[in-house]
Image (cartoon, helix red, strand yellow):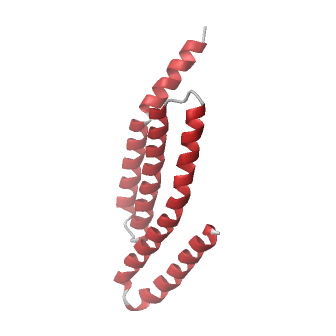
Amino acid sequence: MDIIKIIGIGLISLIIIVIVRQYKPEFTLYVSLLAGALILVFALDKIGGIIDLLKSLASKTAINNEFLVLLIKITGIAFLTEFAVSICKDSGESAIASKIDMGGKVIIVSMSIPIISSLLETVIEILP
């Protein structure tokens, strides 16, 4: 099970960080980045399967493929933004973390405008 691997990587990294922090605190960020990258690699395997499932469902329905691609991009931006925010917070840079978070939200909202516009057009067509 992949969750066992992910939890194992997280806990082992935590133990290493606690030990390393006593002797070389500047190396804790590197351990955290490595752990995050390993966990991301395990998660990417599952994300590929989810994307394939969404593509097959979209081909069976009348969902515009552009919207599906846009939703996948938005989800990727959300994951990457959260990853960067977590790294910044772990480093003690909460001010930078909040700016990255805000930037990610603005980009997500700007990318979702076509979907929102299409949804509003559909609602307007349905209303008398």
Relative image position of residue 29 (x, y in whole percent): 38, 76
Q: Nearer the viewer, residue 65 or 106?
A: 65
- Residue found 56% across the figure and 27% down from its top: 62
Quarter of the image with the C terminus is top right
Relative image position of residue 115 (x, y in whole percent): 47, 30
Q: Nearer the viewer, residue 12 or 26?
A: 12
Kindly give the residue lying farthest to the bottom in the view shown.
Answer: 23
* Relative vertical location of residue 64 with respect to residue 99 in this rendering, above or below: above
Residue 87 location, quadrant: bottom left
Quarter of the image with the N terminus is bottom right
Residue 90 location, quadrant: bottom left
* Relative vertical location of residue 110 with respect to residue 36 in this rendering, above or below: above
Relative image position of residue 14 (x, y in whole percent): 52, 80
- Residue found 38% across the figure and 43% down from its top: 107
- Residue found 45% across the figure and 40% down from its top: 69
- Residue found 47% across the figure and 65% down from its top: 41
Residue 12 location, quadrant: bottom right
Relative image position of residue 5 (x, y in whole percent): 59, 73
* Relative vertical location of residue 82 with respect to residue 39 in this rendering, above or below: above
